[in-house]
Amino acid sequence: MPLSKLSCLIVDDDRFMLKTLEVLLQQIGVTKTYSSDNAQDALKYIANQNNHIDIIISDLNMPEMDGIQLLRHLGGLGVAMGIILVSGEDPRLLQSVKTLGETFDLMVLGTLGKPVAKQELQSLIEEYEPSADTPPTGPAAMVFADELKMAIANHEIKVHYQPQVSLIDGRIVGVEALARWNHPVKGAISPSIFIGIAEKYSMIKELTNQVFEQSLTQASHWRSQGFDINLSVNFSAQALTQLDMPESIFEQLQGSALRPHNLNIEITESTLASDISIALDILTRLRLKGFGLSIDDFGTGFSSLEQLQQIPFTELKVDRSFVHNANVNRACQVILESSISLTKKLGIKSVAEGVENEADLNLVKAQGCDIVQGYYFAKPMPPEEFIPWARDYSSSLNRPFKPGD
Ligand code: C2E
Ligand code: CA
Ligand code: CA
């Protein structure tokens, strides 16, 4: 898009800075510029249908409403404009704010330090591409999203449970709760699809709540019958934005048969890698309250050892793509080996997902993995099938599943 066609809104409480940016923009050919010395006015301007803005250039440190709050509101409005953040702060802070903006589904073009260099400003602006079709996307996705919304409202999302088995003694140590949606016409829809839609259309918190409530009631019931099992629940990184989440989970556990260490909160590695600064506060407090923290799909993201050490994880789940058939794939084997050896160094538990056959099992056993989960033992199952399965499994091991059996 030619720069002369772009309209830019500049937000900065420093009038001198507003003027400087305006001049710089004009020098690079952007003539339609609007300025605001506070975020509230900027929001009002944007919310007005008659005003069209392609790019917002906003300062981070402003009194009353700062740049981060502005981002949050823009995210709430679902705007499709490009965003450039400017600050005299530490570049690392700018980077984490950029990440934050991306979690709000905003098109953050980049960040600029102060004083702003014309060349850098220009190259960020040149990266802007107007997107005709940002979410909410096409009609099919909308129909699907509406149907999902209805399903959630009608409590049609069910939970299936997949057992986790200890490699030390073969005991069933827990279950992972997995969301299931049986569409009345389209049939069973994979969570890999509807979880993504729920995240995109702001339904993930409600969905996560429902899965958590259902599975907590279920696991509590099993525990009160004498089955000593833990519960693992998947939390999307988007569910980790509510600062009171540790307290509310703690409260929900009161009156159940689960103690905090009986609950594992699973967070996918790939979402964490981009979101670590925001989630850190919540994750640390979850851990302080005694909950287990599990890093899911390990190996698919890019978390560094440093990041891993920052978050007090208690468990690492190696992604199934590095487990199943790893015996015939050297690269997978290397990742599997190094992931398990990492857990030993960090002093946390390792879980191998996707153990489908004896060869997979033997390999993860040889590597010293603690816990396994996979079709070799059982597929995720509806709650009523779990106890019969557990009895069968335990009798094949010749050991009672529950005291008194
Ligand atoms: P995940 O957390 O990695 O869950 C494990 C997935 O691996 C499940 O897929 C499970 O059925 C599958 N699986 C387990 N063992 C094997 C095996 O031996 N072989 C193979 N090929 N697959 C195996 P599922 O249930 O389709 O879930 C897919 C993903 O959807 C989950 O991956 C998780 O990321 C997400 N998900 C499911 N329920 C929830 C939820 O309540 N909340 C959130 N945020 N995400 C969820
Ligand atoms: Ca998981
Ligand atoms: Ca996983």
Image (cartoon, rainbow, N blue to C red):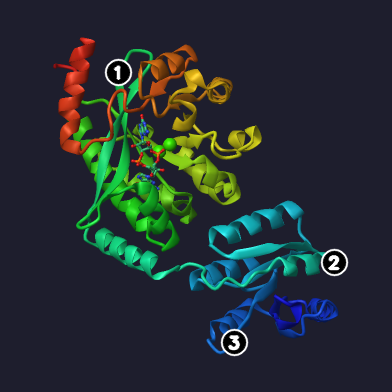
Is tag 3's residue or tag 2's residue first in the polypeptide sequence?
3
Q: Position of residue 33 (x, y in %)?
A: 73, 84
Q: Which kind of residue does numbered mark 2 sit on? A: Gln
Q: Residue at x 56, y 90 (%)?
A: 50
Q: Which residue is mark 1?
A: 171
Residue 402 visible in the snapshot: no
Q: Which residue is mark 3?
A: 51
Measure how far apart labels 3 and 2 are at the Cα level: 28 Å
Instruction: State whether label 1 is within 8 Å of ligand 1.
Output: no
Q: Which residue is mark 2?
A: 119
Asked if the residue at tag 2 contacts the one at tag 3, i.e. Cβ–Cβ closer than 8 Å, the answer is: no
Vertical placement of 362 versus 263: above or below? above
Task: Provide the secondary structure element on which disc 2 rests.
Answer: helix
- Determine which quarter of the picture holds residue 152: bottom left
Vertical placement of 66 versus 152: above or below? below
Q: Position of residue 323 (x, y in %)?
A: 46, 25
Measure how far apart labels 3 and 1 are at the Cα level: 63 Å
Report the front residue among 260 and 46.
46
Q: Which kind of residue does numbered mark 3 sit on? A: Asn
Is tag 1's residue or tag 2's residue first in the polypeptide sequence?
2
381 vs 54, left or right, is left
> Counting other residues with Cα less than 10 Å from the Cα at mark 2, is it few (<14), some (14-19), or many (20 or more)?
few
Q: Residue at x 20, y 13 (%)?
A: 396
> Counting other residues with Cα less than 10 Å from the Cα at mark 1, is it few (<14), some (14-19), or many (20 or more)?
many
Q: Nearer the viewer, mark 3 or mark 1?
A: 3
